Image (tube, rainbow, N blue to C red):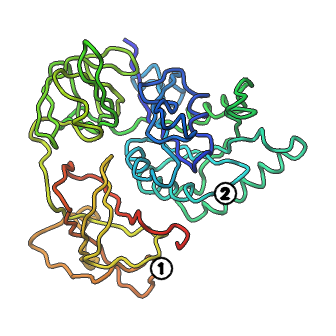
Amino acid sequence: MNQVLNFNVGLLGHVDSGKTSLAKALSTTASTASFDKNPQSQERGITLDLGFSSFAVPIPKHLEGKGYETLQFTLVDCPGHASLIKTVIGGAQIIDLMILVIDITKGIQTQTAECLIIGEITCDKMLIVLNKIDLLKPESKLQQIEKMSKRLRKTLQNTKFAEAPMVSVAAVPGGAEVGQNQSEGIQTLIDFLMNLTYIPTRSEDGDFIFAVDHCFSIRGQGTVMTGTVLSGSIGINDTIEIPELKIQKKVKSMQIFKKAVSKAKQGDRVGICVTQFDPKQLERGLLCTPKSIVAINACVVALQRIKYFKSSCESKSKIHVTAGHHTILGRATFFSLPKSSSAETALDRINFDFDREYLYESDLPSNDSSDTPAKDYFALIEFEKAVSYPHNTIIIGSRLDTDIHIH
């Protein structure tokens, strides 16, 4: 049996940088939610939701002998519009590698910078795609590409992506309206992707947790919930729970990009079909092993301040808290633990211990506060309403109502 390695690649970038066109140029199989099928997306000409598509290649040489014969890239096309940043955060938390798509005629734009920040939090590998090179003057194309590459390298020098490779492409030469010309640079992009691919740490053990991003009904079949397996595995006839609704259902059937399967594991993109469930009850959310996720009103998190956020972070202030596809308001109270010179591991320090004494912090110091003693920072986050988050979830705190032109 052909063993397939599924590798999730996020396409992020500023609105109209050509992410969806790039996904089309790369993909051979589209899911039920891809390429701006949303009527509003088609009407407005921008991506409004997460889109999913895929293509497969032979396993690259550096991954041979690892038990896989085929490498499948699942592309997660994230919207670039500022008002949809919550959707981007949700999409970024299910990817193994990030492609940052940049319109070479525009360079770094506001949402490009936001996507870089999200990428630094959620993944370790990035590939930069300089799109729309067909719009450059032919006589100076190479010089313009080189100039933009140098500008980007300077911008990235203080990030984890300082050495990220860059590829120049024209996903749709002549523009989407023409769309007849052959794409340029796509095979080179695929070669780079294959070289960057690794085998993610995945396990079938533990509770099944699944991030649902679309939910819809199919006449005569039931309701399909599509998404990504975050942990564990799932099989046909297994019982699953929708923790927010406290509803349990049996898995009737499953498909991975239109192919019927009997099992799905961590990292897989899959559609799960159940019966007698109204899709209007769930747009986005989680599925899980019954009783494995409980509703909470507050949580304690170990935290790091994002170095690019220059505003004050005061205790008791309200922030937007995003975990997976859910964003909710919460009140954050900060406290700290002085870093010990003992043999404590980093994991020991960030594990909250009710028996230790912590220091209350009236505000969270900025990263460039050189006179601030070395500490590990934590926050108690009290949510406006109960939420269902798995244990050890990455959460992102933000102020989505901030004027982007101030910071």
- 234 vs 126: above or below: above
Foreground pick, 253 / 276: 276
The amino acid on which the numbered mark 2 sits, given as a three-letter code, is Leu
Structural crowding at the residue carrying mark 2, measured as other residues with C-alpha within 10 Å and reported as few (<14), some (14–19) or many (≥20): some
Residue ID at (25%, 14%): 221
Q: Is residue 341 shown to the viewer in this render?
A: no
Total marks placed = 2
Q: Is residue 234 shown to the viewer in this render?
A: yes
Q: Where is residue 274 in the image (x, y as percent from the top left)?
A: 20, 22
Q: Name the residue under label 1.
A: 368
- 16 vs 405: above or below: above
The amino acid on which the numbered mark 1 sits, given as a three-letter code, is Asp
Q: Image quadrant of residue 352?
A: bottom left
- The residue sitting at the bottom extreme is 371
- The residue sitting at the right extreme is 139
Q: Where is residue 77 in the image (x, y as percent from the top left)?
A: 49, 38
- 126 vs 193: above or below: below
Q: Where is residue 259 in the image (x, y as percent from the top left)?
A: 37, 15
Residue ID at (34%, 63%): 397
Residue ID at (61%, 36%): 192
Q: Name the residue under label 2.
A: 152
The quarter of the image holding the N terminus is top left
Residue ID at (29%, 34%): 229
Earlier in the chain: of badge 2 and badge 1, it is 2
Q: As drawn, is 188 to the left or to the right of 256?
A: right
